[in-house]
Amino acid sequence: MITFMNNSDSEEEPCNERTSLMSAESPPVPSYQDGLQTAEAGEAQAHRKRRTGSSRSPNNIADGDMSDSGVPVRESALENEEEELTLKYGAKHVIMLFVPVTLCMIVVVATIKSVRFYTEKNGQLIYTPFSEDTPSVGQRLLNSVLNTIIMISVIVVMTVFLVLLYKYRCYKFIHGWLILSSLMLLFLFTYIYLGEVLKTYNVAMDYPTLFLVIWNFGAVGMICIHWKGPLQLQQAYLIMISALMALVFIKYLPEWSAWVILGAISIYDLMAVLCPKGPLRMLVETAQERNEPIFPALIYSSAMMWTVGMAKPDTAARGASQQTWDSAEDGGENHRSPLHGDSQMPETRSPGPTRPITSFEELEEEERGVKLGLGDFIFYSVLVGKAAATASGDWNTTLACFVAILIGLCLTLLLLAVFKKALPALPISITFGLVFYFSTDNLVRPFMDTLASHQLYI
Amino acid sequence: PALGLFLFTIARDPLRIIILIAGAFFWLVSLLLSSLIWFIAVKASDPQDEPLQKGLLIFGIMFSVLLQEAFRFLYYKLLRKAIKGLVALSEDSCSPISIQQTAYVAGMGFGLMSGAFSMINLLADALGPGTVGIHGDSQLYFLTSAFMTMVLIFLHTFWGILFFHGCEHRCWWEITAVIIMHLTVSGSTFCNPLYMGSLVPSYLLMATAATWAYLLSGGSAQNLRRFLLCKS
């Protein structure tokens, strides 16, 4: 069954290996506490005391271990205004995450609906060797479970490997790995994607033009992701990469395996982040001990910066924060590449790795966005894309899954605000998504169809 | 029009977007439960029996309407708690969003979701080839569907405002009025494809609900006149 895909399988293999580890890598940024407080201030139904909200600006000294006690409780008149701003910021952070997730999903759904290529079964990944073409239901179920086990074990191995590398400070190796995988992602998958889209719309393009376009796209992408670049461009690239990866998954994972894998990944995610011996948690703690920005792997950061009121020239501080910001972004880039590895990354953490801003008088309202692992993007999009591809209820199911995932994300951010530590972003959203997918497909669809055929409205 | 409303009034404030999406979620859950009930009923009954199926369908719809209102009430409770939390957080004990705005946004969320579910498959099919009403059905299917959906979205929005206002001030008759209106509108769609029977009453009811909600929100004929004449 593995036909042309043989090549891509072997190519994907290194990519997957690299990426999966990476994704596991995105440990929470030490400064997540800041983001937590911002998010919490905005959304928390928990009755936090005022000072936690007001501690937002002084949070610039985001430190992994900065807890509430560390927050200088400077009840000044200014803090009142900051409180108000904080409340709005909290909700704003949620929106800042909503928008890219929505965009990614839209891209995936649009592609699935229009380009035939991604819904044809042309072979399977080497990680899912058991085919699902068997005649009996039991056999099919067994095959999908086996596929899942293999996939999950691959991911676990990758994660552990990456954690070990990180522990023993083999940074160069990790960087190289990430760069290679993102390179392949940017060039190869874009080439395939572009080819398929052009085929669908019957647009002719000669090779030199194609080469030029892809070269430019890839080169700018590499620079943006691994070095410096405008934030929006970087975010756009991250979204595109996640969408491409999700499309690959949707194409190459057999039906039932995909659903079982989604479920298993969220369980694994839960365990990896919350159990004391979980690899992701160890990664986070290691990074916190070393006081470094978490490995720039697979993290989407939505931060922006602006200054609100200034008490003294803060160019120096801004320069410093700019640097830390860039390094955080760089980190985020690398994590992008890993694909299924990303699923490990569903730790939402507040942005802003250690910002060595020391002066408190500068009211730098750094809108440090929230950081979300790219694996999360990918798996959300896989869920919605699969819903769009295989559901017979078409758009209703897709829409239902979309809303479910967004609500899951909301809840996760709320929990983040309450618990103030790295949390897995996958479980809640994926659970909601799965529940809604299956129930909408089987229950709501006949109901709505009957209603629509009689043109009745509820 | 609903999309325009969304863009102008809700897209600015992130809190409203969250409330909107949560509202849509609640509507979805209510739909899920009601279709579950209907599904069970259908499976348990005889599929060949036409009148029974129709009866079951009607029963399903009524039940769904009641469930929707119940979920609106639950959502109201949740929002009350959320606003209390936000107020407690806020420095100057002033809620960032008023209860009326929340009512508007929540109603909007319900409406958008219900409209989306009603319309989107239709739209997708409309893109494809085909002739409307080729089997003797009405040729105005798409048009009427579009209008009906729009009126339903608006109605949900207004009902949201009325409902929340009723809950706030403990005016039970307001709440019952909303429920009755919802039932009437759904019931009137039974007259389809006799479109006179369903569209006209729905629009009338919408006009009533609109004026009522407007008055509740503190508007008055004077405000309206001033607004229209662009007086400062």
Image (cartoon, coloured by chain):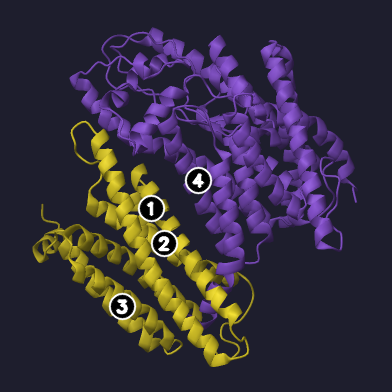
What is the x, y in percent for residue A139? Answer: 84, 57
User: Which is nearer the eye, A200 or B52?
Assistant: B52
User: Circle 1 sits on which residue?
Assistant: B20
Mark 2, Cα crowd under 10 Å, few <14 / some 14-19 / many 20+, is: many
Q: Chain of mark 4?
A: A
User: Circle 2 sits on which residue?
Assistant: B112
Marks 3 and 2: in contact by CB < 8 Å?
Answer: no
A176 vs B102, left or right, is right
- Rounded to the nearest angstrom, the CA distance separating label 2 from label 3 is 17 Å
Q: Chain of mark 1?
A: B
B90 vs B107, left or right, is left
Q: Of helix, strand and loop, which one carries label 2? A: helix
Q: B146 above or below B109? A: below
Q: Of helix, strand and loop, which one carries label 1? A: helix
Specify the chain shown as purple: A
- Residue type for callout 1: Leu
Marks 1 and 2: in contact by CB < 8 Å?
Answer: yes
Q: Of helix, strand and loop, which one carries label 4? A: helix
User: Which is nearer the eye, B199 or A294?
Assistant: A294
